[in-house]
Amino acid sequence: MGRGFQVKGLQALDQKLARNMQMKEVRQIVRANGAEMNETAQRKAPVDTSFLRRSITFSILDNGFSAMSLAGADYSGYVEWGTRFMAAQPYMKPAYIAQKAKFLADMRRLVG
């Protein structure tokens, strides 16, 4: 007499694997776009001593679902938004705006 077996939940497993593959791609998109935005911010940062440019760092948060670019110089906000004594020299916002469209296009391509 032969014995048989049946695998239950194969469809659920297949869906979970497909979802996990998609999540891996989301993390890759977040990392790539975050790194590009960081590089753009570094390029756009005004240079006097190069300290501001070197202080712009990049990190991945939320298990790969968030990226953060941070200007660590104490005076970075003054440069970005200006003061009553000096005009603004934005570098982070233009980098964000430039990257936003590419990020959205990459995400649409993934889900479309």
Image (cartoon, rainbow, N blue to C red):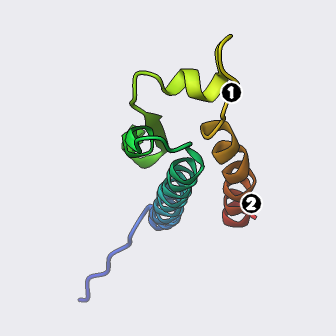
Residue 101 spot, x, y in % from top left: 75, 53
Place of residue 3 in the rendered image (x, y in percent of width and height, measured from the top left):
26, 82
Contact check, label 1 and label 2, Cβ < 8 Å: no
For the residue pair 37 and 77, the one nearer the viewer reads as 77
Residue 87 picture location, percent across and down: 70, 24
Residue found 31% across the figure and 81% down from its top:
4
Which residue is tagged 2?
105
Q: Residue at x 37, y 45 (%)?
A: 54
In this image, 57 relative to 103: left or right?
Answer: left
In the image, 88 versus 27, the foreground residue is: 88
For residue 12, above or below residue 90: below
Q: Which residue is mark 1?
A: 88
Depth order, front residue of 69/1: 69
Q: Is residue 79 above or below residue 94?
A: above
Q: Which quarter of the rendered picture does the N terminus lie within?
A: bottom left
Q: Quadrant of the C terminus?
A: bottom right
